[in-house]
Image (tube, rainbow, N blue to C red):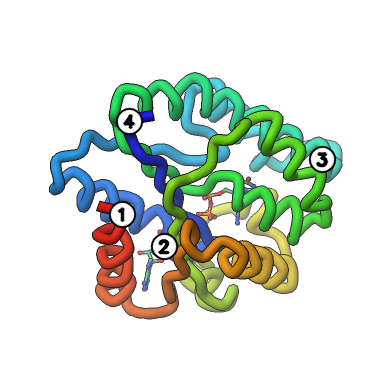
């Protein structure tokens, strides 16, 4: 692969969408071609999987089905969009990837890390992000920032303790893989967050 794969992670409202464009601009300023994308979703077909995952269904979504749908969407996204872009030398910046599955379906919903790891190896083989920026803040900060948006999706209705488990799983992963996963204090004002992000991106560049 000629391009690099950079992901942004963190609980809801920590600023992933806000900083996705910032990261893309930093890379473009250095002359790289950049593709910005997201999970779940990223291609028209994978966005349809996203709709299934986020919408309130008339029947419960079993945690195992949720996990399999996450990886189904990822398989589509990876083969149809991410790999081809990287092979053409494009840098890909993605709002969430498999760390979110460990955090939400693992830490949040209780699916085992072993099971998630098996699916990860099956769908991705050796493919992993080159760099992951974990925007970290207490759930009260993130949820407070997004509190007044429209109707909540199937994840946003979860309680504070769900997001605390998600956050702890993210932090455990960052401790286990410190060179790939860099923790950014997302509770700081945006200018300070972006200064930290710039430092991490400059290291990769
Ligand atoms: N999910 C999963 O379960 N498993 C998986 O494998 C994957 C995903 C891939 C959809 O994700 C759901 O999918 C997600 C987990 C699940 N559900 N949840 N929760 P998503 O990424 O589409 O949804 P999200 O995390 O809810 O995105 P978000 O709410 O838009 O959060 P954000 O992108 O991190 O925040 P933002 O929109 O950039 O910023 C929120 C507000 O804060 C906005 O008004 C900003 O202007 C403001 N902001 C941002 N930074 C700052 C700072 N530093 N200071 C002050 N204000 C700030």
Q: Secondary structure at mark 3?
A: loop
Query: Is 189 left, or right, of 66 in this rendering?
Result: left
Counting residues from the N terminus, which is met first, the one under dot 2 or under dot 3?
Answer: 2
Instruction: Give the alpha-carbon distance from disc 1 to disc 2, as whole Å.
Output: 21 Å
User: Could you tell me which residue is drawn at 37 percent across and 43 percent down?
Assistant: 93
Contact flag, marks 2 and 3 (Cβ < 8 Å): no
Counting residues from the N terminus, which is met first, the one under dot 1 or under dot 4?
Answer: 4
Query: Is 170 left, or right, of 26 in this rendering?
Result: right
User: Could you tell me which residue is drawn at 69 percent across and 53 percent down?
Assistant: 102
Q: In the image, is the residue at mark 2 within 8 Å of ligand 1 by its beta carbon?
A: yes
Q: Relative to the observer, which residue lies in front, 174 or 194?
A: 174
Instruction: Give the alpha-carbon distance from disc 1 to disc 4, as whole Å.
Output: 14 Å
Viewport quadrant of the N terminus = top left
Q: Secondary structure at mark 4?
A: loop
Instruction: Give the alpha-carbon distance from disc 1 to disc 3, as whole Å.
Output: 39 Å
The residue tagged 3 is 61
Contact flag, marks 1 and 4 (Cβ < 8 Å): no
Counting residues from the N terminus, which is met first, the one under dot 1 or under dot 3?
Answer: 3
Which of the labelled discs sits on residue 15, or is there none? 2
Counting residues from the N terminus, which is met first, the one under dot 4 or under dot 2?
Answer: 4
Mark 1 vs mark 3: give the one in front.
1
The residue tagged 1 is 204
Q: Secondary structure at mark 1?
A: helix
Q: In the image, is the residue at mark 1 within 8 Å of ligand 1 by its beta carbon?
A: no
Q: In the image, is the residue at mark 4 within 8 Å of ligand 1 by its beta carbon?
A: no
Mark 4 vs mark 2: give the one in front.
4
Which of the labelled discs sits on residue 46, or is there none? none
> Can residue 35 be seen from the camera position used here?
no
Local packing at callout 3 (Cα closer than 10 Å; few below 14, some 14-19, many 20+) is: some
Mark 3 vs mark 4: give the one in front.
4
The residue tagged 4 is 2
Counting residues from the N terminus, which is met first, the one under dot 1 or under dot 2?
Answer: 2
């Amino acid at each position: 692969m000629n391009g690099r794969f950079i992901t942004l992670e963190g609980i809801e409202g920590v600023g992933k969408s806000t900083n996705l464009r910032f990261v893309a601009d930093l890379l473009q300023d250095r002359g790289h071609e950049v593709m910005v994308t997201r999970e779940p979703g990223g291609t028209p077909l994978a966005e349809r999987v996203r709709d299934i995952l986020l919408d309130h269904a008339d029947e419960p979504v079993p945690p195992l089905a949720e996990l399999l749908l996450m990886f189904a969407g990822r398989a589509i996204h990876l083969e149809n969009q991410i790999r081809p872009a990287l092979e053409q030398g494009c840098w890909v910046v993605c709002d969430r990837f498999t760390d979110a599955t460990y955090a939400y379906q693992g830490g949040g919903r209780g699916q085992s890390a072993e099971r998630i790891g098996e699916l990860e190896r099956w769908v991705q083989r050796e493919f992993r992000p080159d760099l992951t920026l974990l925007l970290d803040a207490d759930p009260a900060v993130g949820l407070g920032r997004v509190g007044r948006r429209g109707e909540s999706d199937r994840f946003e209705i979860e309680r504070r303790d769900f997001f605390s488990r998600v956050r702890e799983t993210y932090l455990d992963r960052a401790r286990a893989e410190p060179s790939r996963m860099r923790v950014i204090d997302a509770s700081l004002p945006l200018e300070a967050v972006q200064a930290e992000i710039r430092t991490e991106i400059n290291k990769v560049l």
